[in-house]
């Protein structure tokens, strides 16, 4: 009987609440960075529920409350133009020099400057993902791979315009910084450099005769002996073969970007009278970094915005 009375009393209280407490709008204020907002108070069974009215208000907006979203820009100039269109005094750019997926990202509504600067959402952005050039991708694809003479000749025919004529190192001036870097690199690597014509001649028609020699020597005082194995390669006329061990290519790192000079080391092998070729691009990490830094410096100058190497929070 008591349980029945308790349930009846609870029901009666709920009925009174529903009859006497009506829906209402209540203004809520918070800290210094919180705009006063109105919330909707509604009766709900035994009490009240608070509901945001934002979604109802937003239905009737004639313009967004804030700018937000990420624009994907397809070239460097568009990235700069987009940043200049929407930047303010606190906008920044982040540069990610990952060699597989390099990118630039502008955060146009970044936090206000200094330790007491007001935080902002940082959700209005522009991003430029660097497209690697077709030339860079083509040379990188077969870097270090051994290829038959026919395969190597076909590859060179497709890419021979990338190969540069060797410069006259004696004419490089002291104030020519790229030229001096090249000269120093060639001094380190040593050897003979090939031009476009020489490379094509080598890959198309070189025939090699391998001549094997064994030389034995003995120290008469100690009885120790040495055996030296040597293989000499000769051309069709029987003369010692002199094959260049490097060449230069001039290609852009990024699509539509500046051209950079890269040294390429050339190797060949002779097995059972068959020649195979391989090449190795020299210090592409330095070439990539130089190309990326050039773009960053240009974007920094064109937007007059600070650039941070990294990724935004």
Image (cartoon, grey):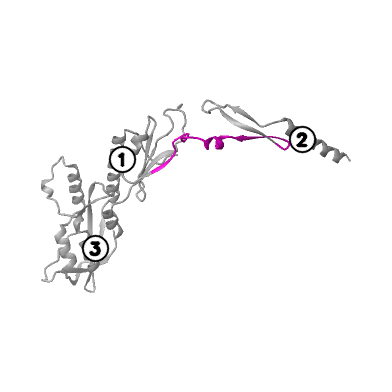
For this rendering, which residue is in front, 159 or 42? 42
Q: Is residue 125 left or right of residue 277?
A: right
Compared across the picture, whether 51 is left or right of 194 comes to: right
Task: Answer yes or no: is residue 295 visible.
Answer: yes
For this view, does 187 lie left or right of residue 85?
left
Q: Secondary structure at mark 3?
A: helix
Give the mark nearest the N terminus, 3 or 1. 3
Report, in whole angstroms, how far the alpha carbon at label 2 lies from the one at label 1.
69 Å
Residue at 27% from the left image edge and 41% from the top image edge: 294
Gap in angstroms between the C-alphas marked 3 and 1: 33 Å
Q: Which residue, given by chain and number where applicable, does mark 3 sit on? A: 155
Mark 2 or 1, closer to the camera: 2
* Mark 2 element type: helix
Q: Which badge, 2 or 3, comes first in the chain's sequence?
A: 2
Q: Position of residue 265 (x, y in %)?
A: 23, 57
| Position of the C terminus by quadrant | top left
Q: Position of residue 97 (x, y in %)?
A: 35, 45
Q: Which residue is mark 2?
A: 15
Q: Residues within 10 Å of mark 2 (few under 14, many from 20)?
A: few
Segment tinted magenta in the rendering: 44-71
């Amino acid at each position: 009987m008591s349980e029945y009375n308790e349930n009846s009393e609870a029901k009666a209280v709920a009925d009174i609440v529903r009859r006497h407490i009506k829906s209402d709008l209540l203004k809520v204020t918070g800290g210094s960075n919180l705009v006063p907002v109105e919330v909707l108070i509604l009766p709900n069974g035994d009490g009240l529920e608070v509901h945001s009215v934002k979604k109802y208000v937003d239905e009737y907006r004639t313009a967004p409350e804030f700018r937000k979203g990420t624009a994907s820009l397809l070239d460097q100039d568009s990235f700069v133009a987009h940043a200049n269109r929407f930047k303010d005094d606190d906008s920044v750019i982040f540069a990610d020099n990952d060699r597989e997926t390099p990118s630039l990202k502008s955060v146009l509504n970044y936090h206000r400057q200094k330790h007491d600067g007001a935080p902002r959402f940082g959700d209005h952005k522009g991003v430029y993902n660097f497209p690697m050039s077709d030339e860079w991708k083509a040379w990188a694809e077969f870097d270090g791979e051994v290829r038959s003479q026919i395969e190597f000749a076909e590859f060179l025919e497709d890419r021979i315009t990338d190969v540069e004529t060797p410069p006259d190192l004696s004419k490089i001036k002291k104030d020519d910084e790229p030229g001096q870097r090249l000269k120093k690199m060639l001094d380190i690597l040593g050897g003979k450099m090939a031009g476009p014509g020489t490379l094509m001649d080598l890959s198309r028609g070189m025939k090699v005769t391998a001549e094997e020699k064994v030389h034995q020597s003995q120290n008469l005082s100690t009885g120790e002996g040495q055996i030296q194995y040597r293989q000499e390669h000769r051309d069709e006329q029987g003369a010692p073969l002199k094959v260049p061990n490097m060449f230069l290519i001039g290609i852009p790192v990024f699509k539509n970007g500046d051209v950079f000079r890269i040294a390429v080391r050339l190797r060949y092998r002779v097995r059972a009278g068959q020649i195979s070729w391989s090449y190795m691009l020299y210090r592409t990490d330095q070439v990539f970094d130089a190309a990326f830094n050039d773009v960053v410096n240009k974007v920094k100058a064109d937007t007059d915005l600070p650039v941070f190497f990294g990724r935004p929070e």
